[in-house]
Image (tube, rainbow, N blue to C red):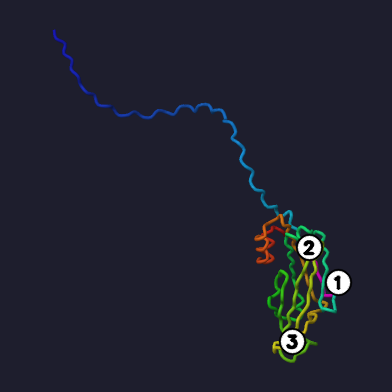
Amino acid sequence: MALVLNSCSVEDGIDGAIGPQGAQGPEGEQGPAGPQGEQGEQGADGNMNLISGEWIHEVSIGEELFVLDEELPLYEFDWEVPELTADIVDGGMVLVYAQIRLYSNFDLPTVPTFDQVMQLPQQVVYDISGIEGEPVEGDFSQKDIWTYSFLEGGIKISFYSEILLLAGDDGDKSVSVAKSEDSDVSLRYVLVPPSTMGKKEMENLRKMTYEEVLAYLGIQ
């Protein structure tokens, strides 16, 4: 009897469904800590180093804070500021702000207006023609100069006026006529130590309004 073997090809069947995922293996051991990185540059000090004075008020110029120097003539106020150190004088910044209401006693429009707190120094120009007790021959305007200087331990606020004859005659430096019992001048300082921010950042403070400076520095 002869045995006959027949060969045949069988096609692959359809893949079966993927089985369920096996259980997660145990977590491996934590690797060794990497080398410590280089220390970064020290950041600028926060606003805890900023020094902001409280508002002070002069009800009438020359009554309490300001003293008249008749030789110049001008009003000066020597403001004792113990927090104003030599470090701040040499490399920091001293900002002085003023709320000046004495012009409103005469209902005088000024340039610039003083409806808000202004940064000193300031030059204020207004027309004084027709003010009671003042000359009215020709058109007069007056320029008030508010400025300040500082040394270690104190700030000096100076205030004087120049009457300018618009016709072209020489001006006469004199003390401001805007003085009455209802006058009100308020002053405040902000001291910025040199360690707090860079020079460029300090200079930007001079371009900001009072409200912007408060928000930027985070002070009340």
Nearest the eye: 143 or 99: 143
Q: Which three-letter amino acid code belongs to the residue tagged 2?
A: Glu
Q: Position of residue 210 (x, y in %)?
A: 69, 66
Quadrant location of the N terminus in the rendered image: top left
| Residue at numbered disc 3 | 170
Query: Mark 1 falls on what kind of element?
Result: loop
Residue type highlighted by circle 1: Glu
Q: Residue furthest front?
A: 90
Residue 62 is a magenta residue: yes
Residue 64 badge: 1
The picture quadrant where one finds residue 216 is bottom right
Q: Position of residue 72 (x, y in %)?
A: 82, 78
Mark 1 and mark 3: span between their CA atoms? 32 Å
Nearer to us of marks 1 and 3 is 3
- Above-or-below relation of 32 to 204: above
Residue 190 as seen in the image, left or right of residue 62: left
Q: In the current view of this chain or complex, which residue is farthest to the bottom?
A: 137
Q: Residue at x 75, y 90 (%)?
A: 136
